[in-house]
Structure formats: C-alpha cells, structure tokens
Image (cartoon, rainbow, N blue to C red):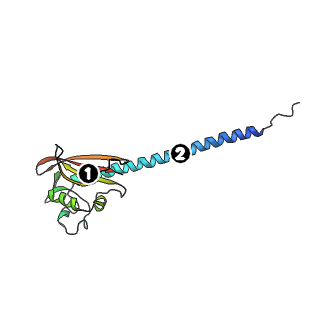
Amino acid sequence: MDESKGQVYLIDILVSLLVISIVIALSASFSAIEIKNSEDMKSRNAMITNGLSATELLVGSAGVPSDWETRAGLPAGIGSLGLATQIGDVTYRNELDIAKVNAFLGIDYVASKALMGMDASEDYRFTITYGNGTVLAEKGMDAPDANNSYMFTRYGTWNGTNVIVGLKVYD
C-alpha cells in the first residue's frame, strides 16, 4: 500500500498562495478603478445638472426678487439670478433685460457662481453673442485645458434682436 497519498508539497502551497494573492490584488485594483470612475461620473453629472439649471435660471426667469438689479449692495439680498425681462407680474422668458445683464456682469465672480447654484470647484464662462459671433457681453474665464467642460446654449432676444446665450462650465 502506498503511504504517500494526500501529501501536500511546499511548492504546491506556495503556488496556490501566489495565485490567490494575484487574484485578490487584481480584484482590489479593478474595484479601485471602478470607484474612481463612478466618482468622476458623479462629478460630471453634477456639473451638467448645474449648467442646465444655471442657463435655464438665467434666461428663463427674472430672478428673486424680480428687481434684484436695482438693489444696492449686490449681491446681498439676491435669492437667485435671472436675466429675463419682467413687466408687472409677467416674465418674458428668453427676452434679456439689459439692466439685469449689466448688473450680473458687475457681480463678483465667486458670488455669481454661488447665485447660479454652481459648486465651488466649477468655473464658467458666460457669453451673449449675435449670430455672427459678435460678443455683446461676457463674464468669467475660459479654460481650454480643463478636465471636463460642457457648453450650454440658449437663444434669446436683446433689444429685439436674436442672440445666443452661452454658458461653458468646467472643472
């Protein structure tokens, strides 16, 4: 009778441990990559949501209060920004109020980000242009080397002329 059955050699144990260690290391590595990717996606989604909300807020509302541009000590007392014209109780979406645009351009950059609901880590460049590219108003800074950037475009009127309102959001 052979007495050597069921013997385990040291080399077998070491190879098994090596294989298990490699599998565990690869699993941990892939998990870390997936966690990073999901965090990046969450950040991009938040940036897109903030950009969409900000452009809708700027072009689609008169702001809160609706006469915010006439108040002293801006940006104090502003609940939200809005550039749309309001006459009485009627807001004219996409019709830009020149006084509101000028007041917006005068607000501190950091304060304007907060009033548009943007994260502190995000930056923006706001423009109002004619269809031929002539710039009527701009605020913020551009970053061609940003990790993520998204351009949001709305159309409106400025003194009865069609314009393009652009907001580029980036990190």
Q: Residue at x 73, y 40 (%)?
A: 13
On the image, numbered disc 2 is attached to which residue? 31
Residue 95 is left or right of residue 171, and the answer is: left
Quadrant where the image shows the N terminus = top right
Q: Residue furthest top?
A: 1
Is 114 rendered above or below residue 162? below
Q: Nearer the viewer, residue 141 or 42?
A: 141
State the count of labels: 2
Percent from the top left, x then y, of residue 89? 15, 59
* Disc 2 to disc 1, C-alpha distance: 36 Å
Q: Is residue 2 left or right of residue 44?
A: right
User: Which residue does the numbered mark 1 point to in the structure image?
Assistant: 55
Dot 1 amino acid type: Thr
Is 22 placed left or right of 162 in the picture? right
Query: Is residue 60 something one can see in this rendering?
Result: no
Q: Write the residue at 21% across / 61% down.
A: 106
Task: Assess disc 2: are there few (<14), some (14-19) or many (≥20) residues with their C-alpha within 10 Å of its C-alpha.
Answer: few
Q: Which residue type carries mark 2?
A: Ser
For the residue pair 29 and 157, the one nearer the viewer reads as 29
Identify the secondary structure beneath mark 1: helix
Neighbours of disc 1 within 10 Å: few (<14), some (14-19), many (20+): many
The image quarter containing residue 82 is bottom left
Secondary structure of the residue carrying numbered label 2:
helix
Image mark for residue 77: none
